[in-house]
Image (spheres, coloured by chain):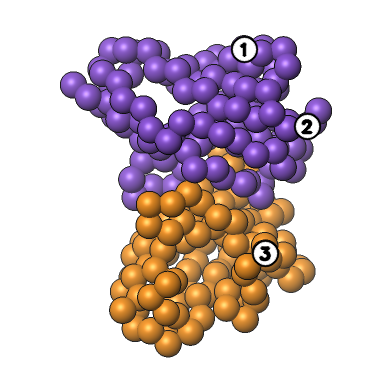
Amino acid sequence: LAKTTQPISMDSYEGQEVNITCSHNNIATNDYITWYQQFPSQGPRFIIQGYKTKVTNEVASLFIPADRKSSTLSLPRVSLSDTAVYYCLVGDGGSQGNLIFGKGTKLSVKP
Amino acid sequence: SAVISQKPSRDICQRGTSLTIQCQVDSQVTMMFWYRQQPGQSLTLIATANQGSEATYESGFVIDKFPISRPNLTFSTLTVSNMSPEDSSIYLCSVDAGTGNTFGSGTRLTVV
């Protein structure tokens, strides 16, 4: 499974757009990129998954360049409730249950 | 997506004792996964539990310490055996929800 690297922490203010970038230089051809969100005292929650280009859902957008060696999670107009740890994972989308988590990015949203 | 009920939500246990954590899913799933999250750390996969076969353990985790049961397609238990303070962690079960995994809310274990 490809190793991922992301910033340990980020600070933002309410209403701003937040972009968290993840590096995965050794991504394999059949690997998908998946992001999870974890609030304190809760299990991680799936946010978004993509293979290439751009994916958007009601929560976030995921931008993946052509070489797929990195990806960027974009959270539009964050609020205080978006304060959480965000994990970027790379793995085979067909057998993704046994996930390998990196250290994650702790996002702090301030008023 | 699947809904997971995990019990207990927290417990404080004496060293040398064992605790069994239960995970109930509202739909049938082939595989269930158990994770550990130590204080301030990321999640680490302990094992994968398949119904009808022995669990598959990750490096650093052994069956004698973390025995797992998987009696049917909606239920699994993880036992933390002969506990020491180093076992104080959050333990989470998870299932593959098709696109991404669904996690239980976790069991916060404190060993004293």
Q: Is residue A1 above or below residue B60?
A: above
Q: Name the residue beneath numbered marker 2.
A: A28
Q: Which mark is residue B22?
A: none
Q: Position of residue B7 (x, y in %)?
A: 42, 64
Q: Is residue B41 above or below residue A92?
A: below
Type of residue at label 3? Answer: Ser
Q: Is residue B49 above or below residue A111?
A: below
Q: Nearer the viewer, residue B74 or B84?
A: B84
Q: Nearer the viewer, mark 3 or mark 1?
A: 3
Q: Secondary structure at mark 2?
A: loop
**Image check: B80 left or right of A4?**
left
Whole-number angstrom distance, CA of label 3 to CA of label 1: 35 Å
Characterize the local packing of mark 3: few (<14), some (14-19) or many (20 or more) Cα atoms within 10 angstroms. few
Marks 2 and 1, the one that precedes in the sequence:
2
Q: Name the residue beneath numbered marker 1.
A: A54
Of all residues, the one furthest to the left in this rendering is A111
Q: Name the residue beneath numbered marker 3.
A: B59
The reply to whether discs 2 and 3 touch (Cβ–Cβ < 8 Å) is no
Please say whether residue B3 is visible from this viewpoint: no
Characterize the local packing of mark 1: few (<14), some (14-19) or many (20 or more) Cα atoms within 10 angstroms. some
**Image check: A37 left or right of A67?**
left
Supply the letter of whichever chain is purple: A
Answer with the quarter of the image where residue B1 lies: top right
Type of residue at label 1? Answer: Lys
Answer with the quarter of the image where residue B84 lies: bottom left
Callout 2 and callout 1 share a chain: yes
Type of residue at label 2? Answer: Ala
Characterize the local packing of mark 2: few (<14), some (14-19) or many (20 or more) Cα atoms within 10 angstroms. some
Count of number-bearing discs:
3
| Pointer 2 chain | A
Supply the letter of whichever chain is orange: B
Q: Nearer the viewer, residue B2 or A35?
A: A35
